[in-house]
Image: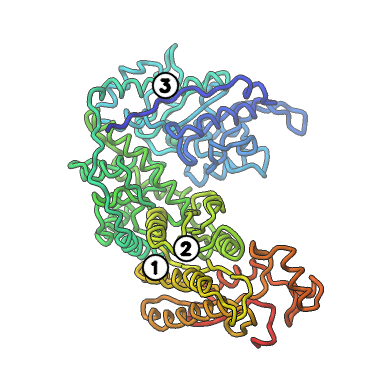
Amino acid sequence: MTTTRSGVTSSWQDEQADSCLNELELRAYSSRLLGQDPHLVLHGGGNTSVKLTETNIFGEAEAILWVKGSGGDLGSIEPAGFAPVRMRQLRALAELTTLSDLDMARELRTGTIDPAAPAPSVEAILHAIIPFKYVDHTHADAVLTLTNSVKGAALIQKVYGDRLVHVPYVMPGFKLAALCAHLYPRQRGPQTIGMLLMNHGVFTWGETARESYERMIEVVSLAEACIHQQVRGRPRPVSPVPSSSPYLEVAGLRREVSEAAGAAMILQVDDGPSALSFAQRADVSAISQQGPATPDHVIRTKRLPLLGRDVATYTGEYERYFAEQASRSERRLHALDPAPRVIIDPQLGVIAAGRSAVDACIAADIYRHTIEIILDATDLGGYRALPAEDIFDVEYWDLEQAKLTRKGSPAPLTGEVALVTGAAGGIGRACAEALLRKGAAVVGLDLNPAVAEVAPGPAWYGARCDVTDPEQVTAAIEAGVKRFGGIDIAVLNSGVFPPSQRLDALEMGAWRAVMAVNVEASVALLRQLHPLLRLAPGGGRVVVIGSKNVPAPGPGAATYSASKAALTQVARVAALEWGADGIRVNVIHPNAVFDTGLWTAEIIEARARQYGLSVAEYRANNVMRLEVRSQDVAQMCVAMCGPAFASTTGAQVPVDGGNDRVI
Ligand SMILES: [Zn+2]
């Protein structure tokens, strides 16, 4: 088995371009084409611009640079994602001999003609000094491969000649703009269509959106062809020793990483053949400990991955790196947490870490591309990243540090992982969605295959699963741990509600079937989750969905009432036995929650009639005369997982609008 690189191609479509109403829309269109190809740009990397003339409120024509807003994503950018900055201001800034990053950020902001526009990209001045209407900038994989390889300079000269201005690495922002302003007139030739930034990326430009875009595709294709030609005939073996999916080891590692980060972290495991092959290479310690392919990535991946599982040594080394590098700075820098964001382990594969499932996914994507770049550059003669100082300067530059202090506090369950059974509908779905809203990643189990689509996105993993089948449950837990790194919260919700049957007519097969789902399956799941819950960075939590029938059973409901009473008793014992492991177990007793799949309008009407009530009276037949919704149960579930219940275990809380038999 071998891997192959798929080449970039132009995705330009005339109909799409023709449907753009103005040049800014066209600028957004071709920016999206760049942003949607991960071999060109990943997660917010790269930037683009167009120079247009706008008439101001005094009727004067003004030259304006529309440049990508800082932090925006090219893949989904719209005209509103561009910041309009006066060219006059940008040209004046370019004339300065020195400009601090914070001063630059302020001047770019004050130079915009619309205070509601996003902050202009830190590369705005560089875009302004390039004397072409359209300017495109990417961190294309193939270009990074060439510029990070030891023979890169020679290969680049051979491939591009004077078609690209060749710029040695300097810090992005004002310094880079100043260096490009200096080099461009000196190196420019009649063939020049762009600029190559060593260890960083590439610019192309043109008089039309299409020209600039297709020049980018051409420049990157030339790099790809060069790499292909150099490494052809050297197939890369991909036949690793398979991973044994030791999910408890992953959860143990996550606990250590979370402790180092000072907050719960999501870990995403890639144990596919490419990741494992990389992790098992004899030279992995040499090639993985060089640094990122472009400094921009450091914010997501940190400078170096952890090799193996010694988190304590990694954090010690990170703290040393910070202390050493920070001593060069005149300002007092705020140290980032020392936890790794990428872990390479020959047995587990490549693991990405992040404060949220989205962050872990971004780190995973970036490192997947980094591996390809490292391997190609190694085949070209050697991968050579920037020295630690340059990476540190981007990791800790003013603008990033300012971003950190601006960022508000994350949602309370950020970085935590919940498992919810019966998550495709009703109370289970409401709990799953409420936990997602509070920042948790959620593993949803349900017999209904629709569980996969409950909340599409990085924080959701929905598995079709019969909770009475131990093999299916184990597979779902393993897959969930591979996706998020562990399980911190278990919401035991799945259950069956059998038809009303009096004791003297009870059918024992039906009794056993209900007990198998409502009691046995839940006990088996609790047993299996215990070692994971014990490793939860913020302490394990179990929320059991019981029933009003536990304190106040009804006639005809022997089976259901007994099953929920047994489950409640199990939860109370779990609270006693697992308290010392930091696991809290609490029970919710809902009643008359009608907005679930169990209740149809006909059933509700029949029940109401049975009690001699109107439907409205029956729906709100409680002390408070209110309708209890699955949302209300979900709110209680979230509260039980949060700080309000930090000192509470073994509690049984009704969510029923007040029931006179329970009170
Ligand atoms: Zn860049």
Q: Residues within 10 Å of mark 1 (few under 14, many from 20)?
A: many
Mark 3 or 1: in front is 1
Q: Quadrant of residue 437?
A: bottom right
Q: Which residue is mark 2?
A: 419
Q: Is residue 480 left or right of residue 214?
A: left
Q: Is residue 586 left or right of residue 247?
A: right
Disc 3 within 8 angstroms of ligand 1 (CB) = no
Mark 3 or 2: in front is 2
Q: Which residue is mark 1?
A: 529
Q: Secondary structure at mark 1?
A: helix
User: Considering the image in quadrants, where does the C terminus appear?
Assistant: bottom right
Mark drawn on residue 219:
3
Q: CA separation, marks 3 and 1? A: 52 Å
Disc 2 within 8 angstroms of ligand 1 (CB) = no
Residue 476 in the image: state x and y as whole percent. Answer: 42, 57
Q: Is residue 332 visible?
A: no
Q: Quadrant of residue 545?
A: bottom right
